[in-house]
Image (cartoon, rainbow, N blue to C red):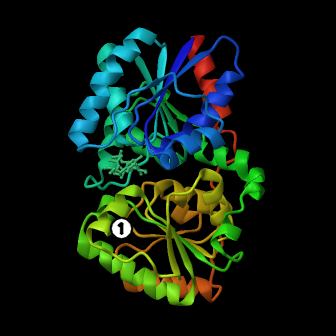
Amino acid sequence: MHVLHVVGARPNFMKVAPVMRALAGRLGIGQTLVHTGQHYDINMSDVFFRQLEIPAPNENLQVGSSSHAQQTAQTMSRFEPIVLTHQPDLVLVYGDVNSTVATALVCAKLGIRVGHVEAGLRSFDRTMPEEINRLLTDQLADLLFTPSADGDANLLREGIAAEKIHLVGNVMIDTLVHLLPAVERSDVSKRLGLKRKGYGLVTLHRPSNVDEPATLLQLMGALAQIAADLPLIFPVHPRTRQKLAALSFPMDDPRLQCVDPLSYLDFLALQCDATVVITDSGGVQEETTYLRVPCLTVRENTERPVTVTLGTNTLVGHDMDRLRLETQSILRGAIRQSHIPPLWDGKAGERIADVITSWSNR
Ligand code: UD1
């Protein structure tokens, strides 16, 4: 049995690592890794391969950045000959980025079976490019691996056959559990002059937050006010950096430290010791829930509702007063009870390998 994995962007890398590791332990399974090259900077890609111990990709399609249509089309046309050459029995795609839907569509048209890892998540907000990618990828997939029970309910409602759906838990948490002991190797707090539980951590890159200058400036204004009470560290995504540079925004406030994107271990170390995390990322909502660190999500909705119902996540929307008030209340120690969602236990990759092994023996 030959499994071909496709990754393209930063959040895919944490998801492929545990699945490849689990499959490597099964007899008779060969694996190929294709990187579409959607993300290509060293600190957005290479450093993750190194720290997560992902084998070097067998193929890199080098699609790079462009408009959605161009990026998707280029991924499709470059992936088609590669997948035809490798002739896999199953292609595994991850998450909800453009590389995910593009390669799933190529496979579906060629009659090659597709498995979707992190299936079923829905924000019910079709202005998000990721929501379109999720909806389409799930319609194309033959095996759907969900991280939480809400994913199963969403898929069933959309008419996906129950026998295709497998509730396996959260692969992103597999990587976190695997690497948590290594966090002690990180000297990031020392480098950045941060004290344990004495800072807030910020990430922002959603088009809805950063593409519109007025929205981005409001957000930066709110962060500067919060930073007066709590120093903030902000690893800036390349998309956000470009937008701030275009506005000539000064990134020199010592209490709102803007730095380049961090490696997996450095970012995990900072999450562990933060007083609060302010974010619009999907994965960070999950990681903070696992680590029991309060998370304020600057979005109107989330495709990861268990992080709100069980975890530490609060949606503050685009209400900057609410963002400030929620931060103040965390600083006063008002932290609500939370739980780690079922099957977020570090073993999702093994459960995926179990399903694939019995599927291949059918
Ligand atoms: C993509 C995903 C998003 C995910 C995010 C994580 C889609 C639709 N979006 O968004 O779901 O949360 O990755 O990071 O697939 N750039 C660089 N270097 C890089 C990569 C990008 O400088 O290595 C810059 C480019 O100018 C590019 C911009 O960042 O135009 C945005 O990159 P892109 O891959 O289009 O989308 P992301 O915003 O990263």
- For this view, does 52 lie left or right of residue 92? right
Cβ of disc 1 within 8 Å of ligand 1? no
- Taking depth in this image into account, of 220 and 320 the one nearest to the observer is 220
The amino acid pointed to by label 1 is: Glu
- For this view, does 260 lie left or right of residue 205? right
At horizontal 76% and vertical 55% (from top left) the residue drawn is 185
Q: Secondary structure at mark 1?
A: loop
Mark 1 surroundings within 10 Å by alpha-carbon count, few (fewer than 14), some (14 through 19), many (20 or more): few
Residue 343 visible to an observer of this rendering: no
Taking 287 as reference, is 112 above or below it?
above
Residue 100 visible to an observer of this rendering: yes
Looking at the picture, how far across and down is residue 158, in whole percent? 34, 39
Quarter occupied by the C terminus: top right
Taking 254 as reference, is 77 above or below it?
above
Query: Mark 1 = which residue?
Result: 300
At horizontal 30% and vertical 64% (from top left) the residue drawn is 243
At horizontal 47% and vertical 13% (from top left) the residue drawn is 88
Looking at the picture, how far across and down is residue 218, in whole percent? 32, 80
Quarter occupied by the N terminus: top right
Counting every numbered tag in the picture gives 1
Quadrant of residue 269 within the rendered picture: bottom right
Quadrant of residue 361 within the rendered picture: top right
Taking 156 as reference, is 148 above or below it?
below
At horizontal 56% and vertical 57% (from top left) the residue drawn is 262
Looking at the picture, how far across and down is residue 107, in whole percent? 36, 20
- For this view, does 115 lie left or right of residue 195? left
Looking at the picture, how far across and down is residue 358, in whole percent? 62, 18
